Every structure is written in structure tokens, then in C-alpha cells.
């Protein structure tokens, strides 16, 4: 094709216009989205009756995570659920420590511990998964916080920071490289799970709108700050390619 100067310029500007117009297009938006693959897992943290309205430690608007999680879960071949699963008289219960009140902090053998109302007692309906959660393909349920003297916000490692749950080994044996975290609560079990996933070497994403927080004395802002510092990526459910 022979072009004079003028038509060459016209051709060039049309090309530029096309390239510039693309970012608004659906194809570009799709290409930017994260597509869960066989090496990706969705970890759904503690979506249990205890953390939902009517539960013993209800997270404000906790139930709102369920429709978001139900919408994204089908895009994941691998889904792991966690359950907070405490024995009666657990060290994290204020009622276990005479004179102590919920939401106070005390020192336990392994360090600072926030005290909570009795919650998620093993085998109770309070500890059951929210029945509205609809993820039939979920392949593993990790129960945590079952040692009477050690709490475990994280799905990977208990609060003594030395007792592993086995989840990192499970995911690595299954060839998982990317971990997406959703559930309750953003500033406790979600954040600790995401930080430990990162620590274990996984690319880690927290899906903000699929989580809700307790937010105790600035804990939510502190959690996001710490996650950002450790390279945990903060995304929205709309950033995921649902196929
Ligand atoms: C959680 C407080 C106590 C959580 C569990 O799931 O975030 N928070 N136990
Ligand atoms: Zn707990």
C-alpha cells in the first residue's frame, strides 16, 4: 500500500484512536481481570452462624458476604472452607478468665490475646456453616482454634505462631500457587489467613467486598496496612473473571 504523507497521517491517527478507545472496551476489561485457574484456591473464612446476625459474635453485616461469595465461588475449581471450632472453656473466651470482659486484651503464654464472648463452640449450631453458603464443590474444611489453650485466627498457623494447621502443606501438594481469601472477619481471621498465605509463598488476594470486619479499636485500618506491607493484594469481586 502506497500512502502519501496526508493519508499516512490519517491512518496513524485512526490507529491511535483505536488503541486509546480500547481501554473502555469489554475485551480490555476482561483481559485485566484475574482468572482463577487450577493453581488457584478460594479460601472462605469462617462463614458460620456465630459470625452472622443472631450469632454469638456477629460481625456487622456479616451475612452480606454470602451472596458475593456464592457468586464468585463457581469460578474456582478449588475451594477450601474454614470453621472457627472452639472447645467449651477456650482460652479466647472472656468467660474462661475470672473478672475479664469480652473485647479486653490479656496476656497468655504466647502473647496478647483479645477476649471474646463464647462463640463457635464445637458441634453447636452456632458453629455450623451459614446454611445460605452454596459451594457444593468445596473440597476441604479446615477447623481451627480447637486447642483449648491456643487461639487460631489464621487457617495456616495457630496464635502461638508455631503450631501449623497443615493447610500450607495441603495446598502445596495440590499445586496451588494463588490464594484468594473471602469471609469473616476482615481484620481478624481473614487478615491473619492472608498474611500467613503470603508468608508461605502464595500469591495472595483479599476480596474486600466478600469480607466484613469487626473493627475493634482501629483493627481494620491496621490490618489493611499490614497486609499491604506484606504484599497481600486488595481486590474486589468484580476484578475476578467469572467466565
Ligand atoms: C474470629 C474473633 C474470634 C474471626 C474468630 O473469624 O475473625 N474473630 N474468633
Ligand atoms: Zn474464635
Image: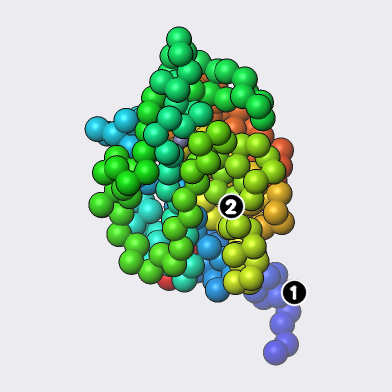
Say left or right for 5 vs 40.
right
* Residue 214 visible, this orientation: no
Q: Quadrant of the N terminus?
A: bottom right
**Location of residue 52 in the rendering, given as x and y in whole percent from the top left corner:** 31, 37
Q: Which mark is residue 5?
A: 1
Identify which residue, 166 or 177, lies in the foreground: 166
Q: Closer to us: mark 1 or mark 2?
A: 2
Extreme residue toward the top, this view? 99
The residue drawn where x is 68% and y is 70% is 12
Res 171 quadrant in image: bottom right
**Residue visible at 42% across and 48% down?**
83
Rendered location of residue 243, percent (x, y): 43, 70
> Where in the figure is residue 225, as x and y percent of width and height?
64, 32
Above-or-below relation of 83 to 167 = above
Give the label on residue 165, or none: 2
Residue at left offset 58%, top offset 57%: 167
Secondary structure of residue under mark 2 = loop
For the residues labelled 1 and 2, the Cα–Cα distance comes to 69 Å
For this rendering, which residue is in front, 64 or 92? 92
Q: Is residue 36 left or right of residue 122?
A: right
Name the residue nearer the viewer: 136 or 179.
136
Neighbour class for label 1 at 10 Å: few (<14), some, many (≥20)? few
Amino acid at each position: 500500500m502506497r500512502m502519501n504523507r496526508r493519508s499516512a497521517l490519517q491512518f496513524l491517527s485512526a490507529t491511535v484512536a483505536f488503541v486509546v478507545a480500547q481501554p473502555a472496551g469489554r475485551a480490555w476489561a476482561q483481559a485485566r481481570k484475574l482468572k482463577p485457574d487450577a493453581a488457584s484456591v478460594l479460601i472462605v473464612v469462617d462463614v458460620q452462624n456465630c459470625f452472622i446476625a443472631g450469632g454469638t459474635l456477629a460481625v456487622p453485616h456479616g451475612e452480606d458476604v454470602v451472596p458475593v461469595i456464592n457468586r464468585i465461588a463457581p469460578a474456582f475449581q478449588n475451594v477450601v472452607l474454614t470453621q472457627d471450632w472452639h472447645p467449651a472453656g477456650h482460652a479466647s473466651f472472656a468467660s474462661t478468665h475470672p473478672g475479664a470482659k469480652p473485647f479486653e486484651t490479656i496476656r497468655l503464654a504466647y502473647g496478647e490475646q483479645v477476649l471474646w464472648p463464647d462463640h463457635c463452640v464445637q458441634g453447636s449450631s452456632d458453629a455450623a456453616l451459614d446454611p445460605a453458603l452454596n459451594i457444593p464443590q468445596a473440597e476441604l474444611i479446615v477447623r481451627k482454634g480447637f486447642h483449648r489453650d491456643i487461639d487460631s485466627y489464621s487457617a495456616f498457623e495457630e496464635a502461638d505462631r508455631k503450631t501449623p494447621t497443615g493447610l500450607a502443606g495441603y495446598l502445596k501438594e495440590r499445586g496451588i500457587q494463588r490464594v484468594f481469601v473471602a469471609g469473616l472477619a476482615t481484620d481478624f481471621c481473614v487478615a491473619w489467613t492472608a498474611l500467613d498465605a503470603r508468608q508461605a509463598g502464595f500469591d495472595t488476594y483479599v476480596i474486600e467486598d466478600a469480607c466484613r470486619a469487626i473493627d475493634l479499636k482501629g483493627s481494620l485500618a491496621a490490618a489493611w496496612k499490614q497486609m499491604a506491607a506484606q504484599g497481600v493484594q486488595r481486590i474486589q469481586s468484580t476484578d475476578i473473571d467469572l467466565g
